[in-house]
Amino acid sequence: MEVLKVILSHLKKLDYVLIALVLILSSLGLLMVYSAGYPLGYIKYGNGSYFFMKQLQWLLIGLTFFSAAVFFPYKAYGKLIRFLVKLSFLMLLLVLLPGIGVEKNNSQRWIHFGSLIIQPSEAVKLVMIIYFAYVYAKKQRYIANFGKGVMPPLLILAAVFFLILKQPDLGTAVSILLSCGAVLLCAGIRKRHLLLLGTMAGAGIAYFAMTAPYRLRRLTSFRNPFQDENGDGYQLINSYLAIDSGGFWGNGLGNSVQKLGFLPEAHTDFIMAVITEELGGVGLLMIIGAYLLMMFRGVRIAVQINDPFGKLLAIGLTFQIMIQSLFNLGAVLGLLPITGIPLPFVSYGGSSLMFMLISAGILVNLSSHVKKSKIREAYLL
């Protein structure tokens, strides 16, 4: 009876708007994976529902972990962080080993886990945010000391960055840098230290981009895709065609033309182009609105929670979701380079969906620990 009271008390404090946003985006993603992936599923596997069924399987697994994360005491992650970081390094090393790592499209980013294929870097994103939030919450007293308060966790981050870059996956590596950077910024680092680290990170990213010709072409082709219509610009041009065809109201669910073999990765990285073609600009605006509202709720949680670890964790999780959303939507709209980052909760991809749901579950859990006031409630509904 006492346990039931605790559970009910916990349930009353949760942010149900945030829960609704996660469920809406995940459900829409499942629907659009069915629509965008049907032609390729039928051609490649003889089953138009192939990608839908895979995504549904991962969604059910993800929702199970989401529910567990909502109730699991978030402070316990601090006690597990050493193990989680070691496990992350182990997985990143295993994925590079021949015979263990699974190669697709000239990248080796996956490993078999029973009958499932897992992308370790998706788990590492979450682990690094937990690690940074926990460590810098402990270092608040000497955060102004660069050598003692700032530097040690950055060495772990640098090692993770290089291992993910070896897969190669510059987009994921950069997204982890930015998410951890948001945690570091909110931890109270000095401005000159932040400027130094930002300059070093920018120089490092530029170096790794320019030393690999294929990366440089991919990162610069978005500026004028029509210079190479049948090469690096092909995907973005077909994204433009899909968006233009959809107009504001769309052509109707299931009526995309670009998904019929014209737009590569129609159900994964460029699913937003198909959504815009079928549901129009109104569908695009609704999804952008959902992410912005999710960001507002996440930042609100971070502002209202008193515990430094919880505060930094909420910031990191929120910006992880927002950075990925920005990278994906920017690429689809031709505003940012194509990095291969999936759209959170929406794109096809089991590992991405599962770990995004776990991240969201932790954020919902944190919402039950906020200290609200009447003034805040009046302005932050």
Image (spheres, rainbow, N blue to C red):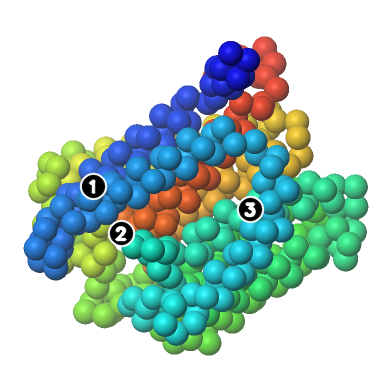
Residue 192 horizontal/vertical position (percent): 81, 61
Q: Mark 2: few, some, or many residues within 10 Å (few <14, many ≥20)?
A: some
Image quadrant in which you'd find residue 145: bottom right
For mark 2, what is the residue? 268
Residue 168 horizontal/vertical position (percent): 47, 77
For mark 3, what is the residue? 129
Q: Is residue 16 left or right of residue 33?
A: right
Compared with 192, 297 (above or below) is: above
Q: Which amino acid type is shown beneath numbered disc 3?
A: Ile
Residue 216 horizontal/vertical position (percent): 45, 80
For mark 1, what is the residue? 32
Q: Can the viewer see residue 302 in this picture?
A: yes
Q: Which amino acid type is shown beneath numbered disc 2?
A: Thr
Name the quadrant of the N terminus: top right
Q: CA distance from mark 2 to mark 1?
A: 10 Å
The residue located at (22%, 56%) in the rendering is 51
The circle drawn on residue 40 is: none
Q: Secondary structure at mark 3?
A: helix
Dots 2, 3 in contact, CB < 8 A: no
Q: Earlier in the sequence, mark 3 or mark 1?
A: 1
Q: Earlier in the sequence, mark 2 or mark 1?
A: 1
Q: Which amino acid type is shown beneath numbered disc 1?
A: Met
Q: Is residue 136 left or right of residue 312?
A: right
Name the quadrant of the C terminus: top right
